[in-house]
Amino acid sequence: MENIPLAEKLRPKNMSEYVGQENIAGKNGIITTLIANAKKTGYFPSLIFWGPPGSGKTTLARIISNELKREFYEFSAVNTKTKDIENIIINISNSPLTTNNLQPVIFIDEIHRFNKAQQDKLLPHVEKGTIVLIGATTENPSFEVIGPLLSRSRVLVLNQLTEGNLKEILKRGEKFTKKKLDKNAAKYILESANGDARVLLTVLEIASNLTKNKDISLKIIEDALQRKQYTFDKRGEEYFNVISAFIKSMRASNVDAALYYLARMVEAGQDPLYIARRMVVFASEDVASPTALVVANEVFRACETIGFPECQENLAAGVVYLAQAKKDRSAYNAYMEALGDVRRFGNLPVPMNIRNAPTKLMKELGYGKGYDKYTKESLLPDKLKGKKYFKSEG
């Protein structure tokens, strides 16, 4: 018992102990209702839990199994082969079902790490109702879980735990460890946990072992934590959310928000050159002044030459400039419209008067005939005569 982490020791065993996710696990939440109905009918659907780390996905799966008195098999897609799961299912199929003659719960953590073929193998068992599948993922299931599996399951969204939720969990941790955090220490650990109950309890456990005193100070929590936890999986949705927020903040000329999202990316370990490249693209797409492209390019060069951490200053200066610069997407929008016509109509014939005429024959055929460098007429192919792509926003 001594070697079991505090987060595991304090893991809730039933719905009355569960903290957070009131929208689905509260008194009238869907999980509560499904459990109540399953106790009467025996039916419980397969589920996909989508939520950030430490929000209670695994705990909720275990509680469902406990409440329904079902056999529970837990796997992680990180280190499990689908054959291991299939062997369990074969054993289930070839032997009498559980004591209650009810399907067991197969829980797969990080189910998004299974590829399409691996997920396909689960389909027949979910379809036949041999098992109740509960998958957990931190990634958007729309992109990471195959459609047929999604259509046979119910996706439930778990939110990041609130400060109130974390306070309740912290109280339980203090009671168990017989320690008490002072006001500043408690505030810091709640902020630093970033909505993750596991992080909260892990830091509390480390801090408890760093002092023999009953009271835990801010300094001890800082020593235990070392660094706040930031959600920024470079393959995950939050990665794209923060980058999107960064670009849109600059586009809206919101300097403060742009700097905040820049800091989020840098602190989470994003490559400064990647950020600088996005700024170069932004300068071309969104800013009217050609100087913006020069500035963005120089920021990129500075990041390349100076490197991290000093190049943070170059990034910040560039972001402030680009966010404050006048915005004009006229050139970008015009080009994209022209590109659309190219893809729609293919290689339309170039007007004769602006064709190249390097040979006598080509001149005789009318190539370049009537060309006037001062002409005001449309030089687009006949099918697009009079088309206006560029519409200045200035």
Image: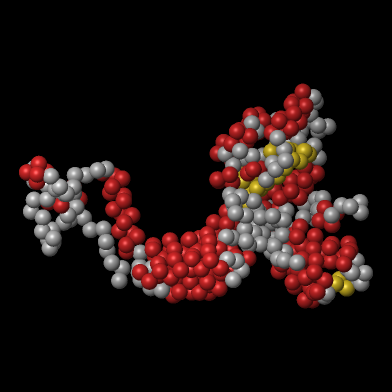
Identify the residue at the far front of this view: 359
Residue in the foreground of this view, choosing between 250 and 9: 250
Q: Which residue is drawn at 77% across and 55% down?
A: 18
Position of residue 354 measured from the top left corner of the image (x, y, whole percent):
15, 52
Position of residue 311 measured from the top left corner of the image (x, y, whole percent):
56, 69
Residue in the foreground of this view, choosing between 296 and 247: 296
Q: Residue at x 58, y 44 (%)?
A: 144
Residue 86 against residue 263 in the figure, above or below: above
Position of residue 257 measured from the top left corner of the image (x, y, whole percent):
53, 71
Q: Which residue is drawn at 78% across and 47% down?
A: 63
Q: Picture quarter containing residue 284? A: bottom left
Residue 329 against residue 154 in the figure, above or below: below
Residue in the foreground of this view, choosing between 193 and 135: 193
Q: Picture quarter containing residue 214? A: bottom right
Direction from residue 374 to residue 270 in the image, left or right? right
Residue 263 against residue 364 in the figure, above or below: below
Q: In which quarter of the image is the C terminus?
A: bottom left
